[in-house]
Image (cartoon, rainbow, N blue to C red):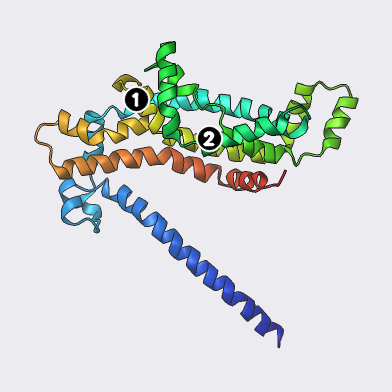
């Protein structure tokens, strides 16, 4: 068989894989593209002709009406505050706990780590009532403390970082100890630079989880003043119909699409900017410890 024939045989599976991935990509992105384009259509056109888009009918009416009817600005603000505070706690505490599990030998280490992993098997809804009762006793219902502290040190984050840190050679740590570096100094100067891809991947996942979190915020922050973005989005239809007398289904649909498009933009930008770091982090987190 000639070299040309070998190359052709190798190219066929690649061509089929690329075609499959292209079809899958189109299938996944088509609903997103439709929602964004439809948010710029007149409300009536969304219902009458949902699959067509005429640039001549481009309008911002859905966005203007949505900003008037829905407190989406306060939702973004509350989500931003929770995201910064909770994300900082997760990114600081989870790697430290993972470092202890990965590199220290102490009594009950495996038992404690197993207990941490067991919490991953508990459905979120099982923990809601005990956590809510705890927040009530502390007087933290409808406060940022209730939105930030529960779940800020996530079991999955600890597990993820343990897998990454376990791949760091012990010889590097021993060399730093011989040079007189303290334990926290070893973590900061040796471990952190070595696990940056894993930290980047954890950072992206943490941002996405906090940004999309709905179950706990809707329980812990029942007041509209403390509602996060996802809670605001869940009550959009009620707010629109309540604030605008005689609003019809088309109006509500148009404003819902406008709000969903705005909520999508931060995550879309985040993934585009950090795509390389996210993929590297996923690979780093797959290392067996």
Q: Is residue 35 left or right of residue 266?
A: left
Q: Is residue 156 left or right of residue 110?
A: left
Q: Quadrant of residue 137?
A: top left
Residues at marks 2 and 1 touching, judged by CB atoms closer than 8 Å:
no
Q: Secondary structure at mark 1?
A: loop
The residue that mark 2 highlights is 206
Does residue 127 appear in the picture of this structure?
Answer: yes
Instruction: Reply above or below: 250 against 104.
Output: below
Hey, which residue is sitting farthest bottom in the picture? 1
Q: Secondary structure at mark 2?
A: helix
Residue 73, given in percent of the width and then of the height, sits at: 33, 27
Residue at (71% x, 47% y) in the render: 288
Residue 227's label in the rendered image is: 1
Give the total of numbered labels: 2
Residue at (84% x, 35% y) in the render: 172
Q: Is residue 57 left or right of residue 3?
A: left
Residue at (77% x, 32% y) in the render: 103
Residue 239, given in percent of the width and then of the height, sits at: 21, 30
Image quarter of the C terminus: top right
Residue 102, given in percent of the width and then of the height, sits at: 73, 34
Image quarter of the N terminus: bottom right
Residue 267's label in the rendered image is: none
Q: Is residue 182 left or right of residue 26?
A: right
Earlier residue among tags 2 and 1: 2
Instruction: Reply above or below: 141 against 218.
Output: above
Does residue 192 appear in the picture of this structure?
Answer: no
Residue 157, given in percent of the width and then of the height, sits at: 59, 35
The 10 Å Cα crowd at callout 1, few under 14, some 14 to 19, many 20 or more, is: many
Q: Quadrant of residue 238?
A: top left
Instruction: Reply above or below: 27 against 138.
Output: below
Residue at (36% x, 31% y) in the render: 229
């Amino acid at each position: 068989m000639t070299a040309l024939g070998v190359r052709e045989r190798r190219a066929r599976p690649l061509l089929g894989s690329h075609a499959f991935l292209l079809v899958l990509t189109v299938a996944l992105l088509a609903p997103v593209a439709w929602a964004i384009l439809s948010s710029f259509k007149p409300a009536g056109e969304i219902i009458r002709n949902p699959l067509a888009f005429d640039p001549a009918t481009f309008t911002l009416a859905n966005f203007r009406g949505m900003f008037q009817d829905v407190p989406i600005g306060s939702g973004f603000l509350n989500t931003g505050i929770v995201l910064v505070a909770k994300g900082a706690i997760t990114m600081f505490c989870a790697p430290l706990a993972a470092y202890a599990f990965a590199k220290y030998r102490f009594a009950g280490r495996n038992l404690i780590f197993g207990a941490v992993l067991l919490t991953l098997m508990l459905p979120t809804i099982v923990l809601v009532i005990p956590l809510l009762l705890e927040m009530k006793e502390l007087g933290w219902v409808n406060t940022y403390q209730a939105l930030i502290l529960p779940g800020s040190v996530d079991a999955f984050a600890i597990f993820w970082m343990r897998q990454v840190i376990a791949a760091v050679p012990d010889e590097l740590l021993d060399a730093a100890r011989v040079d007189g570096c303290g334990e926290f100094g070893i973590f900061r100067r040796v471990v952190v630079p070595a696990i940056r891809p894993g930290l980047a991947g954890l950072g992206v996942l943490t941002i996405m989880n906090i940004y999309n979190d709905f179950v706990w915020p809707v329980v812990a922050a029942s007041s509209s003043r403390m509602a996060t973005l996802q809670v605001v989005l869940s009550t959009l239809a009620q707010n629109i119909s309540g604030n605008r007398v005689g609003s019809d289904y088309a109006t509500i649909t148009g404003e819902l699409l406008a709000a969903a498009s705005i909520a999508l933009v931060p995550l879309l930008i985040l993934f585009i900017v950090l795509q390389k770091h996210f993929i590297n982090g996923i690979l780093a987190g797959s290392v067996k410890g």
